[in-house]
Image: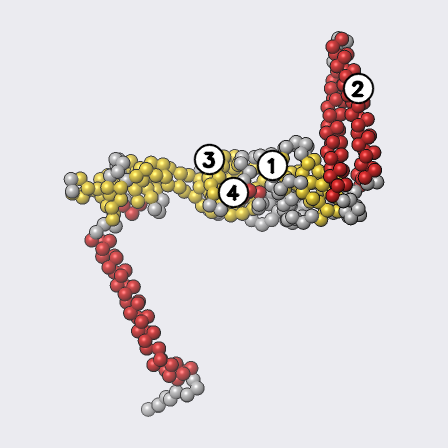
Amino acid sequence: MKRYTLRPDSFLARLLKFLPNCRLPLLIIVVLLFFLLLSQLIYTGISYLFPRVRVVDWGTIEHGQWVDVLVLRSEAVLAAPFNGEASLLVEEGTRVRTGEAVAELVSTEARSKLGADDRVALRTIAHRLYHIDQEVAQIEKDLAFRAVHNQNLAGEQAEERYLSQRKAQLLADRRQLDRNAEAICANWRECYHLVVVDQPGIFSTQLDGGEGFDLLEHAQPKGLLTRGSTGNRGSSPKVKADEPWAKMITEYTQTLVCQLSDGVNLDPPEEAVLLVNGKRFKLSFLATDYTNCRWYFTEDTMPPEFLAKRSFSAYLIYRSVTGLRVPTPALAYEEEAGWTVTTSVKGDKRPTGVEVVDMNEQWAIVKGLPLGTAIYYR
């Protein structure tokens, strides 16, 4: 008969030597596990002997799923005319009006030459020149219209003379302003540029390469868009000639492309709710593709949560029902009686038939019970 001996330096021998020192901790762990198991048994017994009571209330149940979201919107990219540095005159993501100055660009060569007062002077001159150009363009349109529809009336001729004089005065002012700017900085247009927006919108320096995509030309919701991608520029003040450095979001309506899970076949809703960072945003249904796995919605508030990223994951609530609400575990189904809940009438518990309108794992919307009815369930 073979006999086996433990080597003193073996793992099992060291473990056996260590066990006597761990008797108390092991005993405490065993006792805690026993009490934990005992508490679960007691809770199960109490739940069986004493059912829970819930009052029928008014509530809403929601159905949704996680989706990948791609944001498409109308965006105009701004390119720098020269190498230099950009100084923002408005904050990132600000809604601006037509004719508002949003940034100024100073070339690398002129950055050390132009002081703070020089920049303020050039900014004022450039802003005034922009408005002069806008007014001159409008006067030229009016004069062209009057030339075609000239009725030789005294009032019409006087108005035409006024417009011509006003245009001449504006052109003279423009030449004088240009001379003032040249006195501050020679060839100032080559080293200073004031960015003035010509239509209302949202100004942003967050470029991700997805600018300019539309409904018919976009990548999958997952992953970055790659056509013309410049990466997220962030808040770097450096700009390069002919390269994008900022953008204007020119419309306050954006399109959200929601990619559903494969194999899901649902009827698209007229309206939906998107949960992003704990906030709820209402969406209006626009269209679906031929697979019915990609839904298109429009969103009109343009919140910062949608401007920060081009694509992200969010929870889409595509259906919600409001009515009398009971816990789903309170429902019981029988082939003949249908759906029932246990209620109390004059102290006696008995099943009451209900019509289930909609349900999820937690709640059910039912008909056939008065508001405030007490129901029992385990």
In terms of sequence position, does the residue under pointer 3 or pointer 4 come before the other?
A: 4
The residue at the point 43 percent across, 43 percent down is: 64
Identify the residue shown where x is 32% and y is 42%: 364
The answer to whether residue 9 is left or right of residue 21 is right
Can residue 214 be seen in this snapshot? no
Q: Is residue 372 visible?
A: yes
Instruction: Please say if 200 is above or below 209.
Output: above
- Marks 1 and 3, the one that precedes in the sequence: 1
Q: Is residue 224 left or right of residue 158?
A: left
Q: Amino acid at mark 3?
A: Glu
Badge 4 crowding class, 10 Å Cα cut-off, few under 14, some 14 to 19, many 20 or more, is many
Task: Pick whichever of labels 1 and 2 is earlier in the sequence.
Answer: 1
Q: Is residue 230 above or below residue 34?
A: above
Instruction: Please give the name of the residue rendered at 55% of the width and 42% of the height, measured from the top-left corner.
Output: 304
How far apart marks 1 and 3 lie (CA) works out to 27 Å
Indicate which disc, 4 or 1, sits on the residue closer to the N terminus. Answer: 1
* Label 3 with label 2: CB-CB less than 8 Å: no
Q: Of tags 3 and 2, which is closer to the observer? A: 2
Q: Which comes before the other along the chain, label 2 or label 4? A: 2
Q: Which residue is mark 2?
A: 165
Check disc 4 and give the amino acid type: Cys
Amino acid carrying label 2: it is Gln
Residue occupied by mark 4? 258
* Label placed on residue 271: 3
Residue toward you, 136 or 324: 136
Q: CA distance from mark 3 to mark 2?
A: 56 Å
Q: Position of residue 332 (x, y in %)?
A: 26, 45
Give the SS element for disc 2: helix
Residue that appears at 58% across and 50% down: 223
**Quadrant showing the N terminus:** bottom left
